[in-house]
Amino acid sequence: MPLPSPRGPLSEALLRTVSGADDPGMLVTRSARVSTADDLLTDDDAQLALYLMYELHYGGLGPDADVLEWHPDVLAARAHLERRLEAALRQACPVQPCAPRELPRRLFDLAAGSSAPGTPSVPGFLARQATVTQVAEQLVLRSPYQLKEGDPQTWAIPRLRGRAKAALVEIQADEYGGGRPDRMHAELFARSMRSLGLDATPNAYLDHVPALSLANVNVLSMFGLHRRLRGALCGHLAAFEMTSSLPAKRVVAGMQRLGLEQDAWEFFDEHIEADAVHEQVAAHDLCGALVAAEPELVSDVLLGAWACLELDTRVAAATLTAWRSGRSALRVPVAEDLAEAVIA
Ligand SMILES: [Fe+2]
Ligand SMILES: [Fe+2]
């Protein structure tokens, strides 16, 4: 993958380690120095460093990725950031636990609350008034996750049993295209990016993506990589599926309003029906079955669902604030001609 620019001392140490210029020991020192006073979710340096450490477990990062993936110093630095990230989420989560049998309903209530009138909605903006450039910005903001859609959740499959495992595999089979590489959701998203003139190489736009959008993926990677957090991973997936179908419909409407071709909106069109099914499977068969078997995981399932909805809301608020004041929602705007050329 193309390497991004550093955003501070920690991401600089990581990028130097990845390129072989530094020893990974520097990472441990610098991760310990990340300020505890600031909001970790909007800390550009910490979120980029964490994102890149997780990339070692996905597509790899640099020529020494095979060694660095399980290097004790990289893992120690990552663990330091993860402890702070998890603690910050647990401290901020206001959701009270419920009885295991009430969990599916609680998940639907949480998801409904996050899309109540007055809450920031990027799909609503896209449907009504976004420009092609803003559509392209939204694809760039989503690209760190969507170009590996499904992968963080796959980590949880060996950690589940019975009905919950079968439910997760059922969802994942759809995410991975049911055996057809051209129907993999990550590939449909790549096609959407290409149709707007964007580069669909994973992480090509990392320098453009703000900390909060990276945090959104990092939280999911953290839930996925730790067996201990399997409940949070399942809750996150359920909330994600529950808030996908109707918004996807709005994105399709926005793209069609702008005259964009099918390749642009097919990814979203696919999710209108797929996620209307997935939300039921995720709430009842995945999360419901999980807490029936392991009732002590109820709080973590709700934590994961809340984290998904909270981060989406914060990203949406930041995106809409930027757009409404005539600014780019990205750290660095993508060249406007990329998107405008498509409909010219
Ligand atoms: Fe999907
Ligand atoms: Fe889905």
Image (spheres, rainbow, N blue to C red):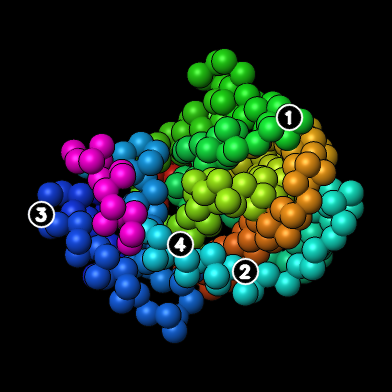
Circle 3/circle 1 CB separation < 8 Å: no
Residue 37 in picture, x, y percent from top left: 44, 84
User: Which quarter of the figure is the N terminus placed in?
Assistant: top left
Amino acid at circle 4: Glu
The residue where tag 4 is placed is 82
Tell me if mark 2 has few (under 14), some (14-19) or many (20+) residues whose alpha carbon lies within 10 angstroms of its own.
Answer: some
First reached walking from the N terminus: tag 3 or tag 1: 3
Q: In the picture provided, is 20 more to the left or to the right than 206?
A: left
Per the model, the C-alpha gap separating discs 4 and 1 is 29 Å
Which label is found at residue 21?
A: 3
Per the model, the C-alpha gap separating discs 3 and 1 is 47 Å
Tell me if mark 1 has few (under 14), some (14-19) or many (20+) residues whose alpha carbon lies within 10 angstroms of its own.
Answer: few
The residue where tag 1 is placed is 162
Per the model, the C-alpha gap separating discs 2 and 1 is 28 Å
Magenta-tinted stretch: 63-77
Amino acid at circle 1: Gly
Give the structural element (helix, strand or loop) at label 4: helix
Res 78 → quadrant: bottom left
Tell me if mark 3 has few (under 14), some (14-19) or many (20+) residues whose alpha carbon lies within 10 angstroms of its own.
Answer: few
Res 62 → quadrant: top left
First reached walking from the N terminus: tag 2 or tag 4: 4
Per the model, the C-alpha gap separating discs 2 and 4 is 12 Å
68 within the magenta span: yes
First reached walking from the N terminus: tag 2 or tag 3: 3
Q: Is residue 325 above or below residue 24?
A: below
For image coordinates 64% across by 74% down, the residue present is 92
Q: Inspect this view and state whether residue 293 appears.
A: yes
The residue where tag 2 is placed is 90
Q: In the picture provided, is 334 more to the left or to the right than 159?
A: left
Q: In front here: 313 or 52?
A: 52
